[in-house]
Structure formats: structure tokens, C-alpha cells
Amino acid sequence: MMDVEEERLCLFGIADCSLLPPTIMVRLITHNLLACHAKDCNANNFPLQFKDVKLEFREADFNPDFLKGFMPKIEWKALVDTARELGDTSLPLEQPEMLDDDFLKNLHHVLLEIHVEEGSMTCPNCNHVYPISNGIPNMLLAEHEIG
Amino acid sequence: MVVDEVREVSSGPQTSLLALAPLRHKMPSRYLFHFAQAHDDFRLPELASVAELHGISYSLPQEPENRDPKRPYMAIDLEREDHARTLARRCVLIKAVYEFYGQGSTYKELHEANRKSKLLWTRYVEDTSFRFLVTAYQHKIPQSRQRDVIESFSYMGFLGKIEMKNPEITLTVFEEYEDRHGMTRVKYEGDGNFRQLFFGRLLEEGSARPLIGKFDVKKRSYYGNTSMEAEVSLLMANQTLASPGKFIYDPFMGTGSMAYPAAYLGALVFGSDIDGRQMRGKQKTPGVIRAATQYGVASRIIDLATFDITHNPWRCGELFDAIVTDPPYGVRAGAKRLGRKKELSEEKKALTLQHSLEARADDQPYIPPTKPYELSHLATDLVLFARYLLKPNGRLVFFLPTVTDEYEEIDIHAMLCEGMEVIANSLQDFGSWGRRLVTIRKTTREQYAPPTFPPRLPQDLDEDVHVPAHKDFREKYFQGFKPKAEESKELS
């Protein structure tokens, strides 16, 4: 379905994604916070594996204080591995002790500016597939998966 | 600074007592707050929240009648003038802030107080253009008397130019009349029978109020029939202490009404909902993102996800600075959670399992069954959920509908758990029912295991547990909030 604006752009032959409002996509900060929560799936249920993804990069406000405050919450290995899988090797394997500006900028980019468009996330343990549609991951469980 | 020295020796007997206090380095100054005529129960909680966010200390008037939040004017002491300005820029319910020159129940008293404040206004006497206004709350003052009032201040001896447009300073006299809602009266009736007079110099008009127009739901590119009105969503955002670098979560995101003001104030917002359709709308770009784009805050909507809070995928707790939400309470849309109203037979269970595992040819996603989520259970669960997900000192801000005749304060306290404390509870009154904006602070540093939310069965009901008036709110709403006695009479 197209809205009026989109239709208008098509008419002029300039229907280009960049002219439309950004589609939301799963950012790596979200990916780092969600685990499989199906019934009895309690171990090895994180990180979820991205499949068939398309990437997009979008600028976000750089806020060093937010990043520093958020650092202790990050599962570092999961973040670095996922970023590398998606082609970003800017983060060190170990969380550094000195948080210089270069590091924070890389972290900012990985956490907040890499977006995963359509695709899915699969649990490495129970293989539950969480589909992502229009950038919104569907984390609902099926009837037999709830406790 | 000269100005500061002037302040310290000014403003009456109360401050001269404070001057003896050994630890006070700086005397507070007094400011007159003019509140907007709306949501009086929300005024002081908003003031307290914004003051906390900006590290402003303030003191309200000593006498209970002078700090009654239902009254439109209040003289509040602050340490610095820029604190008064900050409050006026961020509080939605502040119309304007004035430097306080005096108050009284008669003009004689007012003039006496104003003469004592001379050191505050004497610097404007020589050569400052000014405008002098006389205005009233709940009354219209005849022009002739307005002139008389202005003339009665002639002893101030202002020599500057009188300028109605763009004066350097504006001096205002306020006459406060009692509320006379719904009473018919002839024009100017009761003129002069004011309750109290206030006088001061305009410092700053409230600049957060125009945001109500900016966030007007009707001008929003995406909204639904349960979208929260702009003014209240802004008040909620202030209760969350939203500011740059804060991480805020709405677990009943719906069409995102609470997210936009919070993001506008700088916070990063995450939204989830059991029903993705509300967040998504009917176009490719989710409705929430379209509306956020309109306000220039799309990059601060971190992500959206579809899930049920009773079966949530959060990997760990202590993530958010605030949780802000308007849970669906059932008048236009009832809350839902995963599960079935009635358990299926084993045979049917096997069939549905098979069905949900099979690939669907039509490409339609599998939609799990949901059942109603009773409001009082939802509220209790929400507090537990928030305690797990909030950082220490984080806030849970949400609306709870209540039945006016049955509400008791214990209703709110009955939903609390250890480490969660109510810091504000403001009523928006709709007559037979109302809704309360509840602000709860996480006071504990203890880390909790992820809470589970087992479905409650009717036989689990404990006789000793307090039954809050918001229980079965939906049913009560559609029955017109009849008292129990009447109900049983009708049945018999």
C-alpha cells in the first residue's frame, strides 16, 4: 500500500527510498538486549542469529554519556561477533578500559547506526525463528511455547 | 554582582530569619508562579520532577492555604533567577513566572508588601520602559477600576516610558477570585471581592505550553482512537525526567503518543506492544516512525518490537531510566495477554500445535491466541516488570483508571512491591470515573530475577487481599459505575 506522498513521488519517477521517511530497522543495541524466551529455552538462547539481512546505515545523535552508561549492559562478545558478521570490524575483541573518543564513536556507530532491514533472527538453541517485518521484529511466542 | 546583593537584603521578615541560619550562603528569592488553568492536580508533581531533573531546590509557602495547588498563583522561593526561567521553559502547566513583589488580601496590604520590596524594583525607576497590567482570575475587572489600581501604584515613581508593545519590563497585578464555575452572574458582579492580590515583574512566559499545539494529535501524521492527548503526554514525559542520554521504554506502545514528547526532550525510546498493527499502521513505513519523523525524532525511536510483557524477550534487567505507558484499560481497547480464555482439549491442542508448526502457504504470519488481561492484574504485573527493567532511581509513569466513588488510596499502594515507591498520584477527573497518573520510583539497588506472570485462576483469589476499585474496570465502565447495592437490587 502506498501513501499519497509515495504515489506522488512515483508519478514523477523519483520514488527513491532515501526521499521517504526512514523505515525502522533492528539496531544492534536491540539485538544485544533480546534473547529467545520460548518455554524451556534457557541456555545458549542468545545472541539470536540474523538471517537474510539487508543493512542500512542511518545517523543518530552521538551521546558519549549514554554510551558509557550503557557499556556495562552490553554482552560484548555477542556485539563484536554480530558486528563482524555484518562486516564491521571497528570494535576490539575485549572491552577496552580506556574509553577514548575514537572507540566511543565506533561503538556509537555499531550500536545505533547499523540497522538490519527485513530478515529474521533465529535462536541458536531451539531454532525458533523471529521474523522481522517492516523493521519490527515479531517476538511473540506460539501457543505451545509459552509456559 | 550588585543585583544579587540587592536581593539578599530584600523581601520581608521571613528571609531575615533565614539570614541567621549559619549554613545558608545564598538567600533564596521569591518568585510568583502563574499556573495554567488545567490539570491542577498535576502542577506540583510536574514542578517537583522538573526541579529534580535540573537540580533546582525550591520551597513552597509555609501556610497550607498558600500552597493549595488548586489556586492559580503561588509564591515559591528559589535560589536563583535562572532556576525560575528553567522551570518556566520546561513545565507545561506554568503560564508565566514573575519576580515576586508582594501579596495581600487588600490593596493596603499589597502596597505595604510592595514598599518593602522596593530594593527589587528601585533599579527600574529611572529609565526603564514599562507596561502595567491589572488582571483577574475568574473575573473581569471594569476598565475604570483597572485605571484606579494602576494609579494607586504611583508612589513607585517610575519615570520610564509607558510602552504597551515591547516594554523592557511588565508589571502585573493579579486579583484572585474564588472559583465560580456554573454560577450565572451579571457582568462585573462581585468586583473587588477578591480572595488575594499578587504583584510582580514578568520574568518569563512559559515556553513549554506551546508544545501542546506542536504535539496536537489531530495534526499528527499517524494516530489512533486511543492516542493520548498532547498536553497529558507532555506531562507524562516530564514525569519521566526525559532528557538527552536517557533510555525510556513504553511496553504498551500503541500508536506511540508517549514516545514523541519523550524523544523530543532528548530521550531514546523503545516501544513494544502485543499487537504490532497499532505501531505499524497500514503503510510500509510504520506509523510510529512516520509520526516521529514529523517531529524530527525518528532517530531517537531506538526500535519497536511485537511481544507480550508477560512473555518478554528482555535478556537482562536494569536497562531503562523510565518506563512510561498508558495501558489499555478496556473502554476503547482492552488489554490482552498470550493464552486462551478456556483451555483446549488435548485433541485440539495437538491440532493447533501441528497448525502452528506447519509452513503456511499464504505467507500470513502465525497469530497466537490472546485472552483478556484484567486491569488490576496488569497494574500489579507492570510494577514488577518495571522493578526488573528500571535502573535504580528509575521511574514508572502510567495511567490507572479508577471509579471515583470507590477509589481509596490503598488501591494504588496495593499494587506496589518492595523497592517501588509512589512519588506522585494525580487525578484527571471525568466525573463518575477518572484516571490517575501514577509516578513510581525504584528505590532499591537490589537486583531481581526476571519476574514471571503466571495466569491467575479465579480459585487463586485470596480473601484477605485488598480488592482495588479499578478491578474489572471495563465491566464497571459499561455498567455505568452503579454501586454494588443497587446492582443486587436490580438482580432480585
Image (cartoon, coloured by chain):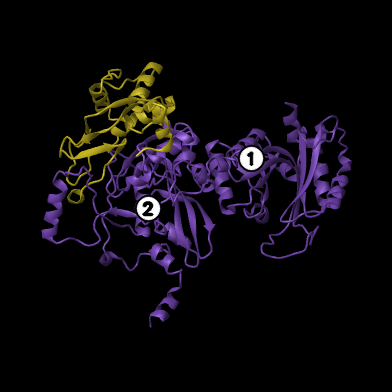
**Residue that appears at 40% across and 63% down:** B474
**Residue that appears at 43% across and 57% down:** B413
Q: Residue furthest front?
A: A11
- Viewed as shown, does residue B314 lie left or right of B361? right
Which amino acid does the dot numbered 2 rest on? Answer: Cys
Q: Callout 1: residue from which chain?
A: B
Query: Which quadrant would residue B267 be assigned to in this image?
Result: top left
**Residue that appears at 40% across and 52% down:** B327
Q: Secondary structure at mark 2?
A: loop
For label 2, the residue is B417
Which amino acid does the dot numbered 1 rest on? Answer: Gly
- Which one of the lettered chains is coloured purple? B
Q: Image quadrant for the C terminus of chain B?
A: bottom left
- Viewed as shown, does residue B203 lie left or right of A122? right
Packing grade of label 2 (10 A; few <14, some 14-19, many >=20) is some
Location of residue B36 with respect to B28 vertically, above or below: below
- Which one of the lettered chains is coloured yellow? A
The answer to whether one can see residue A46 in this image is no
Q: Residue furthest bottom?
A: B492
Q: CA distance from mark 1 to mark 2?
A: 37 Å
For label 1, the residue is B206
B391 or B220: which is nearer to us?
A: B220
Packing grade of label 1 (10 A; few <14, some 14-19, many >=20) is many
A73 or B192: which is nearer to us?
A: B192
Q: Secondary structure at mark 1?
A: loop
Residue A80: horizontal and vertical position, in percent? 26, 24
The answer to whether one can see residue B141 in this image is yes
Q: Callout 2: residue from which chain?
A: B
Residue B29: horizontal and vertical position, in percent? 69, 38
